[in-house]
């Protein structure tokens, strides 16, 4: 198992981040869905257990065209479908991704802690045991100064260029130079990602590949989160929940809509 802790500092408060995160997850789900692929929301409802209360979601990701050919070659048809269960008791969240075909052999667990007025300096935000601390690798993601692309290489300047974006509503940005040391407000996400793929001969390769994907997704998501500030700034949690209901209905329609065939060139 490869364990990495991703630290992502943002130019917002934790309360703003909670809204921004949910807003952008909904937008991303709609953008990635269509033609039988994308995100299917099965459950989105409040939950409470002996430790916390928050929102529970259960989603199914249909990912056939997004999985590299060398991985698809190892799996039977239809085995690229993943289950995601998430418990969002902000500022603590936990997400578990599994695959029905791989059963107990594959899982991705992301445990997130969000800290206000923090610039990524907490050494053990997840209170890990000494044994787990030895396994953990810390990765700091700077959304302004990291390379523009990683594995997916899908940098979109119109949506992600935090070095030029300026929020008209919040009067923040652009993010340049050592912005994370001086920006106000500020908060940091500590995302502990544990990836396990228990198959002899392929374990390290698959786990390393999945961490590259996670880093790319975290970087892209938080760039878009900042650059969409004027769309989510001032939105309430009540409005977000209504947005999520509409998104669930839209996703059903998008998943059922076939992808248009490419037109022959003239």
Image: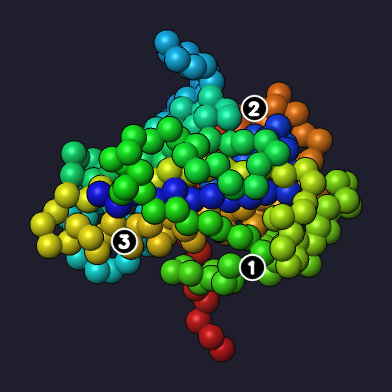
Which residue corresponds to the image point at 33% horizontal and 62% vertical from the top-left? 209
Instruction: Tell me where residue 8 appears, x and y as whole percent.
Output: 58, 50
Query: Seen from this angle, which residue lies furthest left?
Result: 200
Residue 35 appears in the figure: no
Q: Earlier in the sequence, mark 2 or mark 3?
A: 3
Under tag 3, what secondary structure? helix
Q: Could one spot residue 141 in this view of the protein?
A: yes
For label 3, the residue is 208
Q: Please report the residue visible at 12 percent of the width from the left and 62 percent of the height from the top.
A: 201
Q: Are marks 1 and 2 in contact (CB under 8 Å)?
A: no
Camera-nearest residue between 191 and 236: 191
Extreme residue in the top direction: 50
SS at circle 2: helix
> Which is nearer the N-term, disc 1 or disc 2?
1
**Frontmost residue, 143 versus 259:** 143
Residue 38 spot, x, y in % from top left: 45, 49
* Viewer-nearest of discs 1 and 3: 1
Q: Which mark is residue 93?
A: none
- Is 13 on the left-hand or right-hand side of 22? right
């Amino acid at each position: 198992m490869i364990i990495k802790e991703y630290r992502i500092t943002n130019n917002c408060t934790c309360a703003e981040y909670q809204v921004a995160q949910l807003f952008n997850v909904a937008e991303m789900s709609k953008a990635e869905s269509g033609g039988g692929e994308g995100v299917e929301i099965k459950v989105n409802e409040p939950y409470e257990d002996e430790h916390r209360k928050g929102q529970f979601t259960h989603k199914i990701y249909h990912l056939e065209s997004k999985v590299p050919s060398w991985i698809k070659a190892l799996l039977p048809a239809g085995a690229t479908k993943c289950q995601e269960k998430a418990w969002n008791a902000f500022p603590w969240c936990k997400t578990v991704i599994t695959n029905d075909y791989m059963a107990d052999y594959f899982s991705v667990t992301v445990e997130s802690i969000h800290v206000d007025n923090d610039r990524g300096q907490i050494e053990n935000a997840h209170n890990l045991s000494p044994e787990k601390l030895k396994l953990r690798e810390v990765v700091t993601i700077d959304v302004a100064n990291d390379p523009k692309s990683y594995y997916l290489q899908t940098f979109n300047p119109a949506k992600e260029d935090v070095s030029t974006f300026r929020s008209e509503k919040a009067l923040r940005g652009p993010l340049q130079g050592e912005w994370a040391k001086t920006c106000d407000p500020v908060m940091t996400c500590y995302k502990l990602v544990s990836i396990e793929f228990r198959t002899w001969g392929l374990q390290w390769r698959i786990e390393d590949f999945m961490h590259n994907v996670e880093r790319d997704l975290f970087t892209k998501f938080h760039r878009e989160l900042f650059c969409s500030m004027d769309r989510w700034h001032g939105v309430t949690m009540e409005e977000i929940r209504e947005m999520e209901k509409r998104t669930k209905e839209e996703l059903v329609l998008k998943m059922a809509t076939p992808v248009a065939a490419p037109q022959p060139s003239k």
